[in-house]
Image (spheres, grey):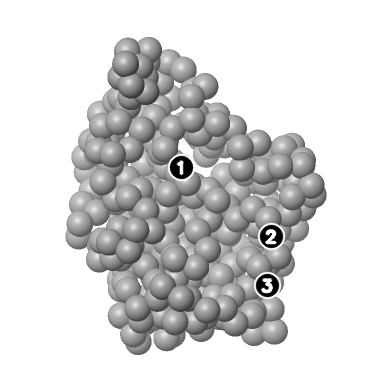
């Protein structure tokens, strides 16, 4: 009996494993509740919980935070904090999720947890209005600016087809562990913001990407340093007028979370939550073809948890 057959026999009553996620419009996930979270999965999708609760269930199913964070390590947590809007507009990562991730990293023994984003609106206002600055401080993390070019260092992107180099924030270079926490939302140019797209917030010059095949640049940069863990916030999802949004009418409350080591797989699953197909998002296809990750969910050992 191979590993997949064993898992199916052992946990088939509570979990669909090694099969494609089946999502419908607005994130209807056809799955049973997980009966056991002790086995690490390739990807975990959780629905119908609060942000911190869904994170706790997902990280347990992925093998625990200690799988990613060791005592004494320096951790970088990268949420979306790009816009000077409140959490209800879903343009930024949910602050309660950010807080839960930071707390768990420190409980695992991290020596420090830093948080930043290269924001689009004024960074001081973004950090405050998003409520992420307060969440970071309450959790014991350190929030820093990404607003000055002096914080960025040039790196080469040797596998890049369009993007050959980029200036990257020094914290990405200095950290031992990189945790990526994007919010799932509509994006006028990239179609969707998810894990790979969120990495634009660690570079200085984003305008080059927009001028030189945005989708290929997103895939190119994902070859440089892949986050150790990707946690996609789909609690509130901006369905249109992204990436900033206009009003709460643009937002659907879905109460989903997707977690994976693999950015491409995470983005593929999140695309389905949104109600689209991964094949319709060019940067997912490019990244899959460049072997950055696997967009074929049929190949994934998936844990699907309904709370």
Question: In the structure shown, which secondary structural element does the residue marked by tag 2 occupy?
Answer: loop
* Quarter of the rendering containing residue 169: bottom right
Using residue 140 as the reference point, say whether residue 259 is left or right of it. left
User: Residue 306: horizontal and vertical position, in percent?
Assistant: 38, 26
Q: Which residue is mark 2?
A: 175
Query: Pointer 1: residues within 10 angstroms few (<14), some, or many (20+)?
Result: many
Q: CA distance from mark 1 to mark 2?
A: 20 Å
Q: CA distance from mark 3 to mark 1?
A: 25 Å
Which residue appears at 77% of the width and 42% of the height? Answer: 71
Foreground residue among 294 and 253: 294
**Mark 3 vs 2, N-terminal side:** 3
User: Residue 75: horizontal and vertical position, in percent?
Assistant: 68, 53
Question: In the structure shown, which secondary structural element does the residue marked by tag 3 occupy?
Answer: helix
Q: Which residue is mark 1?
A: 259
| Of marks 1 and 2, the one in the foreground | 2
Check the image and report above or below for 29 versus 295. Answer: above
- Residues at discs 1 and 2 in contact (Cβ within 8 Å): no
Check the image and report above or below for 16 versus 213. Answer: above
Which residue appears at 55% of the width and 31% of the height? Answer: 63
């Amino acid at each position: 009996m191979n590993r997949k057959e064993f898992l199916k026999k052992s946990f088939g009553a509570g979990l669909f494993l090694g099969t494609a996620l089946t999502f419908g419009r607005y994130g209807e996930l056809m799955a049973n509740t997980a009966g056991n979270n002790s086995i690490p999965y390739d990807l975990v999708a959780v629905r119908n919980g609060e942000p911190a609760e869904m994170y706790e269930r997902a990280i347990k199913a992925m093998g625990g935070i200690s799988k990613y964070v060791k005592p004494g390590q320096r951790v970088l947590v990268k949420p979306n904090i790009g816009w000077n809007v409140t959490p209800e507009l879903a343009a930024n990562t949910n602050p309660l999720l950010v807080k839960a991730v930071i707390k768990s990293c420190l409980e695992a023994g991290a020596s420090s947890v830093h948080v930043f984003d290269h924001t689009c609106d004024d960074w001081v206002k973004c950090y405050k209005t998003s409520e992420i600055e307060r969440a970071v401080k309450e959790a014991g993390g350190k929030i820093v600016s990404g607003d000055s070019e002096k914080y960025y260092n040039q790196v080469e992107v040797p596998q890049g087809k369009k993007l050959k180099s980029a200036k990257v924030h020094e914290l990405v270079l200095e950290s031992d562990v990189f945790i990526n926490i994007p919010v799932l939302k509509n994006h006028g140019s990239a179609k969707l913001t998810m894990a790979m797209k969120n990495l634009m917030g660690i570079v200085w010059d984003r305008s080059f990407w927009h001028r030189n095949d945005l989708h290929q640049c997103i895939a190119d940069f994902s070859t440089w340093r892949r986050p150790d863990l990707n946690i996609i916030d789909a609690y509130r999802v901006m369905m249109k007028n992204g990436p900033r949004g206009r009003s709460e009418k643009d937002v659907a409350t879905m109460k989903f979370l997707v977690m994976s080591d693999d950015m491409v797989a995470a983005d593929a699953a999140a695309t389905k939550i949104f109600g689209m197909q991964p094949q319709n998002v060019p940067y997912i296809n490019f990244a899959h073809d460049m072997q950055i990750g696997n967009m074929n969910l049929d190949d994934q050992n998936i844990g699907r948890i309904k709370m």
